[in-house]
Structures are given as structure tokens and as C-alpha cells.
Amino acid sequence: MMAGDVVGIWEVALSDGVYRIEFEHGTTTGKRVVWINGQEVLRRDWMFKLVGKETFTVGGMETKATVNIEAISGFTYEYTLEIDGKSLQKFIDNRSKVTKTWVLQVDGVDCRIVLEKDTMDVWFNGQKMETEGEFVDDGTETHFTVADHECCIKALSSGKKRAGIVHYLMVDGEAVPGWTD
């Protein structure tokens, strides 16, 4: 990939992975190119209108993404990314409320486990997992297996109205300390 006309780079975390989106805008040629994780997904050459939008999909669930191109002054442009019709920041803020992500090592391999709180779907390194849920005395447990390791996500009441429900990941009965939202 030629980096000469790359004007925007964004990282977008979805349930099925983290995607690096790069946008190339040739203001003299009118070229627009979108790259996702180094793969070209959209190319338009000889666009005479230098401002506008480019819409494409990201990830296995084909999440809608749009790069907005706006003129600031003269030949200066601003590039913003929208995901699912929201600004990238609003999308990130919303994702932190509806998902829980753990980054850990399993058998020496870096892994990313994502829980979608609204559906209770579990993703492991980009693959939706087969899960089994059960109600227990203090909340719920969602069970799944990763490379012969028994995993469980426990959903428990925090006891605090503002905090709501907290989620813990257990691998082979041991709590996983490293997590992010």
C-alpha cells in the first residue's frame, strides 16, 4: 500500500475483531481508497467532487462504516469516520456499555474474548462461540470451551445501583484479572 495519500487511520473494535481502517484521498487525482487491515476494500478513481462520503462495511457482521470528507478551507480537508451511523467516539462509548472485552493468553497465545451484554453472545478471536447459559443463586453463568479449557462468564449484581451487573471471566475455575471495556 502506498502511504503517500493516506489521510486518516482509525482503529475500530468490533465483537469479531479489531480493524485498522485507512483512508487514502488523492486531492489532485480525485482518488479515494479504503483499506481494512491492509486489504483494499473500496477504490474510486477520478472523483471530480473532492468532498462527500464513502460508505463500506467492516468485519464479518458487515457493520456499516462511512468516511466523511469535508472542506475546511481552500484545499484543506477534514476526515471523520462513522460506524453504524454514529461518530466513532459515540460508537466507542456505546460499545463500552454493551460489551465487555478480556485480553488474555491461553496456552501462550494472545486471545480476545468479547461478551455482548445485550444478547449474551460470546466471541473468541473473531469467532462466535457455542455457549450454554444457566441461572445460579447469585446471577447467571455462560459456559463455553476454548482449546480444551473450560470458560465461564459470571454475571453478578454489583450491589450498587449505578454499577449494575458486573461480569467476570473464569478460565479453568480461575478468575481472569486483565479486562477492558
Image (cartoon, grey):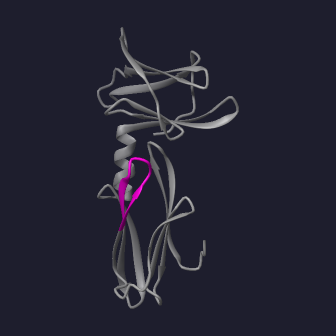
User: Which residue extends farthest top?
Assistant: 137
Instruction: Establish if 141 lies above or below 119.
Output: above
Q: Residue sitting at 37 percent across and 22 percent down?
A: 158
Task: From the viewer's side, name the closer residue of 36 and 135.
Answer: 36
**Residue 169: x %, y % from top left:** 50, 25
Question: Percent from the top left, x then y, of residue 73?
Answer: 37, 87
Specify the quadrant that holds the C terminus: top left
Kindly tell me whether residue 140 is visible in this rendering: no
**Residue 122 part of the magenta-drawn span:** no
Q: Quadrant of residue 175?
A: top right
Q: Which quadrant of the figure has residue 45?
A: bottom left
- Seen in the picture, residue 28 relative to 137 is either above or below; the reply is below
Q: Which residues are magenta?
A: 55-66
Q: Nearer the viewer, residue 110 or 126?
A: 126
- Asked whether, in this view, residue 142 is left or right of residue 4, the answer is left
Residue 77, quarter of the rendered image: bottom left
Q: Is residue 99 left or right of residue 1?
A: left
- Where residue 86 sits in the image (x, y, percent)? 31, 57
Q: Position of residue 48 (x, y in %)?
A: 36, 88
Please state which of residues 11 and 122 is positioned toward the viewer in this rendering.
122
Q: How many marks?
A: 0
